[in-house]
C-alpha cells in the first residue's frame, strides 16, 4: 500500500491554529496591542469599526521591523522573542509563540506598514488568507501600523458565531482595559466607529484606573502592598461600599500580565467576608510579582490561565494583605487615599492581625415571617393567586416567566414561601373587611386570623402595572431638569447606556450627548432628583448582564422606578380610600408579589398568633 500521510499546507495549518488564537475580534486586539508593547511603543492607537468585524487597526510608535522581518513575521513559529527552549521558563514579553500574526493573516485581509527609526523607508506588506499580495518599500512613520479587515471572511462558521456588536465591542473594551491598566505609562486611544471612547495619557496607576472607570473611583480605592519572598503584591481593592452585584472590575495581573484565577479570587473575596453583603462582588486591581521561573504561562493559548508553583502560599498572602489593607482602612478612615503608596503602619501594630469589622445585616428581616425560608420557585403561582383567579378578579397573568427567571438567575431576590395556604375566598374577605392601617401595613381579619398587606409594596405593584401599561402604548412622561444632573459613569457603562438609548428615552430619560461627563437632562416623571440615582445604578447593573433583551431592560427600569416612587407613598386613614386601594390592588395582575419579587400580602394565622402568648 502506498504512503498516505501528508503534511498540511501552511495556509491550512494556519487556519487551524487561528481557531485557537483568534476566537473573536477582541483576540486580534489583544495580540496586536501586545506586540506593540513588546516592540517598546509609548503610544498605541486603536481604531475599530463595527466591533472589529470590518476593521481593527493598531498604530504604534515602537521599534518597527526590517524589510525581511516584515515578511517573516507572518510565518508560523516566527518570533523574535525566544531563541532557545530555556527562554520559555523566564518569559518577559507578552508573546513568544510566534503564531498570532500567522493566524490572523490566515483569516482576514491584513495590511501592515512598518519602519525602523534608523531607516529612511519603511515596508508595506499586504496579505490575505496567508497569501502575500504586496511587499514593497514605502514612506511611512516610525513604528508599525496594522490594519485587519474583514475578519473571518473565509470562515463563515466563525463569523456567524459572533455575538451582537454590543457584546463583541464589550469584549474588545475588556481586553483594552486588561492591557491599559498595567501599562499605565503608555498612552492609548480607542476609537470606535469614529467616536473616541478612551483617550489615556501616561499616568500613575490610580489615575489610569480613574481615567478608565470614572472619577468616582478616586475615593474608592484602598491601596494594598505586601512584599514576601514568594510574591510581591501591589494595587488596590475597592472599598466595600463600592462592591457590585455583578462581577465588574476584578483584575489580577502577574508580572504585568492579566490572568483569571478562581482560587485567588476566592482569597480576595474571603478577605471581604462579613463586610460585604451576600452576593456582592468586591472590585480589585491587584498586581502580583513572582519569579517568572515559578509560573507557567504556557498552559492556555489565550494565556489568561496561569499555573503558580506556590499557589497555596500566595492564596494566604493575598488574603491577609487584603485583610490588612481593609483593616487599616477601617482603623484610619480619614486618611488621604490620594497618596499613591500604601500606609505606614505604626511599629507597635506591625505584628497584630487586623480584625475585619463585622456588620451583620439581615436583609430579609420580617416580623411576620415563618421559620422556613426557601428560594423562590413557584411562588408566583401561589394558592393565593389561584384563589383570586377563582374569585373572578380579572385575569391573573401567568407570571412573565423570563423576567422572573432573570431575578432568580441573579440570585438577588429571595422570597419566603408560606407554609399555610390561603384556601378561602380571599377577595371576598378582603373587600368586605374593614382595614386598619398600622405603620406601613394594612390589616384586616380573615377567617383564619389576620391578613396583612404591605401598603408601600402594594403601591409599588400598582405604579409598576400602570407604568408598564403606558409604556406599551407610548413613551412615558418625562420631566426636564432645571440643571443637568451629573452622574459619574465609567466609559463602558456610558456606552452600555447609550446602546440602549431607545428604551431609556422611551422610559423618560434624556441626557447630554456632548459633555465629557455623563449628565442627565430629563428623568422619568415618576422619579425625583433624589430617587433617580439609585435607579440609574440599578439600570446599569441590569445592562451589564449579557444577552439582555429590551423587555427585560424595560422591566428593570420600570420596576426600579416603581420602587423609588413608592417610597414616599402615604397611606390614607379613610376607610373608603383604603378599600379602594385594596380593590385596585386586587384588580392588578400578580398582586401577591412586587415586580422585584417581594411579598405584598401575607396571613398571620390564629395558630401562629396563639404561639405568641
Ligand atoms: P510573538 O509575539 O509570539 O513573537 P507574533 O506572531 O505576534 O508572535 O509576532 C511575530 C513577530 O513579529 C514578533 O516576534 C516581532 O518580532 C514581530 N512583530 C509583531 N508585531 C510587531 C510590532 N507591532 N512592532 C515590531 N515588531 C513586531
Ligand atoms: Mg505576539
Image (cartoon, rainbow, N blue to C red):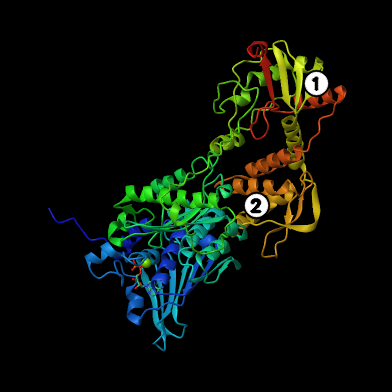
In the image, what residue occupies the spot 72% across and 42% down?
Answer: 561
Q: Residue 172: horizontal and vertical position, in percent?
A: 50, 59
Check the image and name the residue furthest to the left.
1
Q: Nearer the viewer, residue 273 or 99?
A: 273
> In terms of image quarters, where does ligand 1 lie?
bottom left
**Residue 63 in sight from this viewpoint:** yes
Q: Residue 26: horizontal and vertical position, in percent?
A: 47, 59
Q: Which residue is mark 1?
A: 436
Residue 125 got which mark? none
- Spatial separation of the CA atoms under disc 2 and disc 1: 44 Å
Badge 2 crowding class, 10 Å Cα cut-off, few under 14, some 14 to 19, many 20 or more, is some
Q: Which residue is mark 2?
A: 500
* Labelled pair 2, 1 in contact (Cβ < 8 Å): no
Q: Earlier in the sequence, mark 2 or mark 1?
A: 1
Q: Nearer the viewer, residue 207 or 247?
A: 207
In the image, what residue occupies the spot 26% across and 62% down?
Answer: 89
Q: Nearer the viewer, residue 47 or 371?
A: 371
Check the image and name the residue furthest to the front.
348
Amino acid at each position: 500500500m502506498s504512503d498516505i500521510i501528508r503534511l498540511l499546507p501552511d495556509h491550512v495549518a494556519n487556519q487551524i491554529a487561528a481557531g485557537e488564537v483568534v476566537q473573536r475580534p477582541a483576540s486580534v486586539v489583544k495580540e496586536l496591542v501586545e506586540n506593540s508593547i513588546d516592540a517598546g511603543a509609548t503610544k498605541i492607537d486603536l481604531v475599530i469599526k463595527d466591533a472589529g468585524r470590518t476593521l481593527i487597526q493598531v498604530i504604534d510608535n515602537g521599534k518597527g521591523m526590517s524589510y525581511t522581518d516584515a515578511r517573516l513575521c507572518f510565518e508560523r513559529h516566527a518570533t523574535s522573542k525566544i531563541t532557545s527552549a530555556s527562554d520559555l521558563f523566564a518569559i518577559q514579553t507578552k508573546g513568544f509563540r510566534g503564531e498570532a500574526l500567522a493566524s490572523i493573516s490566515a483569516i482576514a485581509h491584513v495590511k501592515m506598514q512598518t519602519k525602523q527609526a534608523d531607516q529612511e523607508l519603511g515596508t508595506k506588506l499586504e496579505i490575505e488568507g496567508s497569501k502575500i499580495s504586496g511587499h514593497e518599500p514605502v514612506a511611512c512613520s516610525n513604528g508599525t501600523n496594522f490594519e485587519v479587515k474583514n475578519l473571518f471572511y473565509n470562515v463563515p462558521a466563525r463569523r456567524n458565531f459572533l455575538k451582537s456588536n454590543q457584546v463583541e465591542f464589550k469584549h474588545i473594551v475588556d481586553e483594552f482595559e486588561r492591557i491599559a491598566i498595567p501599562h499605565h505609562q503608555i498612552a492609548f486611544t480607542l476609537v470606535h466607529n469614529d467616536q473616541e471612547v478612551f483617550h489615556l495619557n501616561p499616568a500613575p496607576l490610580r489615575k489610569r484606573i480613574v481615567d478608565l472607570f470614572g472619577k468616582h473611583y478616586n475615593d474608592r480605592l484602598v491601596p494594598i502592598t505586601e512584599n514576601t519572598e514568594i510574591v510581591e503584591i501591589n494595587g488596590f481593592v475597592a472599598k466595600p461600599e463600592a462592591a457590585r452585584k455583578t462581577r465588574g472590575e476584578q483584575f489580577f495581573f502577574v508580572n504585568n500580565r492579566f490572568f483569571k484565577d478562581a482560587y485567588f479570587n476566592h482569597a480576595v473575596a474571603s478577605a471581604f467576608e462579613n463586610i460585604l453583603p451576600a452576593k456582592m462582588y468586591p472590585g480589585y486591581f491587584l498586581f502580583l510579582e513572582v519569579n517568572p521561573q515559578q509560573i507557567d504561562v504556557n498552559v492556555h493559548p489565550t494565556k489568561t490561565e496561569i499555573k503558580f508553583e506556590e499557589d497555596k502560599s500566595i492564596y494566604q498572602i493575598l488574603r491577609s494583605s487584603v485583610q490588612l489593607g481593609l483593616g487599616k482602612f477601617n482603623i484610619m478612615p480619614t486618611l488621604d487615599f490620594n497618596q499613591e503608596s500604601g500606609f505606614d503602619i505604626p511599629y507597635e501594630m506591625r505584628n497584630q492581625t487586623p480584625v475585619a469589622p463585622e456588620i451583620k445585616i439581615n436583609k430579609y428581616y420580617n416580623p411576620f415571617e415563618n421559620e422556613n425560608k426557601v428560594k423562590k420557585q413557584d411562588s408566583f403561582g401561589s394558592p393565593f393567586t389561584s384563589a383570586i383567579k377563582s374569585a373572578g378578579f380579572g385575569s391573573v397573568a401567568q407570571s412573565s416567566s423570563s423576567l422572573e427567571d432573570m431575578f432568580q438567575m441573579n440570585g438577588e431576590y429571595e422570597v419566603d414561601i408560606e407554609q399555610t395556604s390561603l384556601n378561602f375566598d380571599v377577595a371576598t374577605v378582603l373587600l368586605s373587611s374593614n382595614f386598619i392601617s398600622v405603620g406601613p401595613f394594612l390589616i384586616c381579619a380573615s377567617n383564619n386570623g389576620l391578613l396583612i398587606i404591605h401598603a408601600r409594596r402594594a403601591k409599588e405593584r400598582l405604579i409598576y402595572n400602570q407604568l408598564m401599561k403606558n409604556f406599551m402604548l407610548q413613551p412615558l412622561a418625562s420631566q426636564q431638569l432645571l440643571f443637568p444632573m451629573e452622574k459619574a459613569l465609567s466609559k463602558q457603562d456610558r456606552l452600555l447606556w447609550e446602546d440602549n438609548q431607545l428604551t431609556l428615552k422611551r422610559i423618560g430619560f434624556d441626557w447630554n450627548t456632548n459633555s465629557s461627563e455623563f449628565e442627565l437632562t430629563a428623568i422619568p416623571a415618576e422619579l425625583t432628583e433624589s430617587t433617580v440615582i439609585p435607579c440609574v445604578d440599578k439600570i446599569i447593573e441590569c445592562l451589564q448582564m449579557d444577552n439582555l433583551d429590551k423587555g427585560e431592560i424595560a422591566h428593570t427600569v420600570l420596576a426600579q422606578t416603581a420602587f423609588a416612587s413608592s417610597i414616599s407613598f402615604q397611606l390614607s386613614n379613610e376607610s373608603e380610600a383604603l378599600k379602594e386601594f385594596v380593590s385596585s390592588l386586587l384588580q392588578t395582575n400578580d398582586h401577591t408579589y412586587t415586580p422585584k419579587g417581594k411579598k405584598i400580602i401575607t396571613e398571620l394565622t390564629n395558630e401562629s398568633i396563639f404561639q405568641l402568648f
